[in-house]
Amino acid sequence: MNISFYTSRTGMIAQQQGMNVYANNIANVNTIGYKPLRPSFAECIYTLQHPPREEWQTGHGQYISKTDLMWGQGGLVLSDQPLDFALPNDGFFMTMDRNGDTYLTRDGRFSITQIDEAGDEWVLVNGLGDFMLDYDGNRIVIPFLMSEPRNEMVRDEEGNIIEVRVIPPFRTNDIDVNTLRDMIGVYNVPNNWGLDQAPNNRFVVTERSGEPVPAFIIDENGERRFEHDKLEGMYEQSAVDLAGDMVRIIETQRSYQFNAKMVQVSDEIMKTVNNLR
């Protein structure tokens, strides 16, 4: 058996899988809050080519042992949208889908939607329609600004004031952004590298990552003090290093070509040997 044939074959498979990872990173260069993956390659088993000589070992190619999430900070872009929020830290927003499953995300582009027919209750959602959660794990009901109380003069036909009516405060259509910013929950996990990526720009908690905890502490007055800032009117760009991934694409392509060449050479050697018999 020609070991070089199968060794080069494993190299081709590993480089193709690595190419898939880099291509996915580049495809998400404009995905808000995206964190790229980095493949880690490892050697396959070693065997003794000539048993009497223990120092004579032969390898059997490579494989991808794991992929790591790269947690570099993406660029922060000013959007001037009051419902856009960016996290200049290691925290996460938490979402809940319609099935009650929770996820973590770095995508801070939000909107509002009503959840009752009367239109009295509006909640904060992301682009998927998932509910955004506060620090207690509850859906965020949008706070609206209240109008100022005012007096209304009632006059008679001659213009004389006959009554002063007090107009009580009422809810306006303007969002209280400052209050909303404090309501949006930010969570930490003990081990970011233990999270798994999920579709739609989300992350799934695993045993390796640990459970998410709200990012606040209780001060001596019993008040919550938030550990992370949220930047209003901004969002975080993808953290993909486009130039770096392009270089790695070229390296992977060259490695794949050389492995393919070794498969061809090994096959030609075997043909030559068979023809000599």
Image (tube, grey):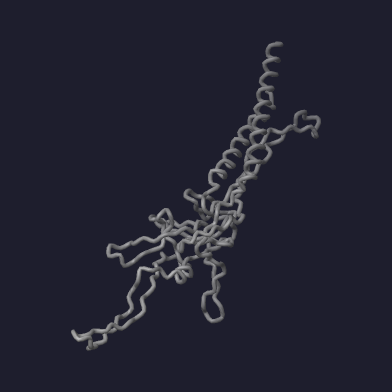
Camera-nearest residue between 32 and 218: 32
In the shown orientation, is residue 146 left or right of residue 211?
left
Residue 207 sits above or below residue 253 on the image: below
Q: Quadrant of the C terminus?
A: top right
Position in image of residue 270 (x %, y %): 68, 18
In the shown orientation, is residue 237 left or right of residue 176?
right
Number of numbered tags placed on the structure image:
0
Residue 79 sits above or below residue 135 on the image: above
Q: Residue furthest front?
A: 158
- Toward which corner of the image does residue 55 lie, by quadrant? top right
Q: Residue at x 75, y 29 (%)?
A: 49
Position in image of residue 100 (x %, y %): 40, 57
Residue 248 sits above or below residue 51 on the image: below
Residue 195 sits above or below residue 42 on the image: below
Q: Residue at x 58, y 61 (%)?
A: 90
Position in image of residue 76 (x %, y %): 56, 58
Position in image of residue 225 (x %, y %): 54, 74
Camera-nearest residue between 12 and 141: 141
In the shown orientation, is residue 99 left or right of residue 62?
left
Q: Quadrant of the N terminus?
A: top right
In the shown orientation, is residue 202 left or right of residue 174?
right
Q: Residue furthest left?
A: 157
Q: Residue at x 39, y 73 (%)?
A: 145
Camera-nearest residue between 239 and 140: 239
Q: Residue at x 60, y 35 (%)?
A: 16
